[in-house]
Image (tube, grey):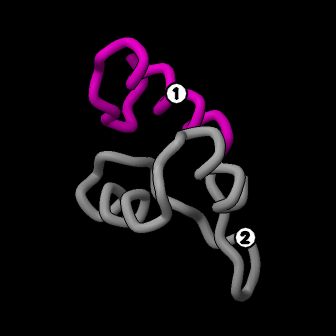
Amino acid sequence: MRLREVIYVCGIGRSTIYLWMQTGKFPKSRLIGSRAVGWDSEEIQKWVNDRLSGREWTGEET
């Protein structure tokens, strides 16, 4: 997923996404090209599900 999609699905802004990535509270982006990054859609969906369930995202399977 590209940043615009992540923002839409998660309902949080760009700066919050990058801040939470640094602190481990949000899935990290991956390099998908020489100048492009993206997020794994399954990780993003797990993050959303964890938030809806009141759990903090850890990046580990539960």
Considering every residue shown, the one lying at the far right of the view is: 33
Residue at x 49%, y 20% (from the top left corner): 49
- In which quadrant will I find the C terminus? top left
Identify residue type, mark 2: Ile
Residue 42, above or below 32: above
Identify residue type, mark 1: Lys
Numbered label attached to residue 32: 2
Q: Is residue 9 left or right of residue 48?
A: right
Numbered label attached to residue 55: none
Considering every residue shown, the one lying at the far top of the view is: 53
Q: Is residue 44 magenta?
A: yes
* Residue wearing tag 1: 46
Choose between 13 and 38: the one closer to the eye: 13
Helix, strand or loop at mark 1: helix
- The picture places residue 41, in percent across and down from the top left corner, at 67, 40
Q: What range is drawn magenta here?
A: 40-62
Helix, strand or loop at mark 2: loop
Q: Residues within 10 Å of mark 2 (few under 14, many from 20)?
A: few
- The picture places residue 33, in percent across and down from the top left corner, at 76, 78
For residue 3, what is the image quadrant? bottom right
Q: Is residue 16 left or right of residue 23?
A: right
Choose between 20 and 29: the one closer to the eye: 20
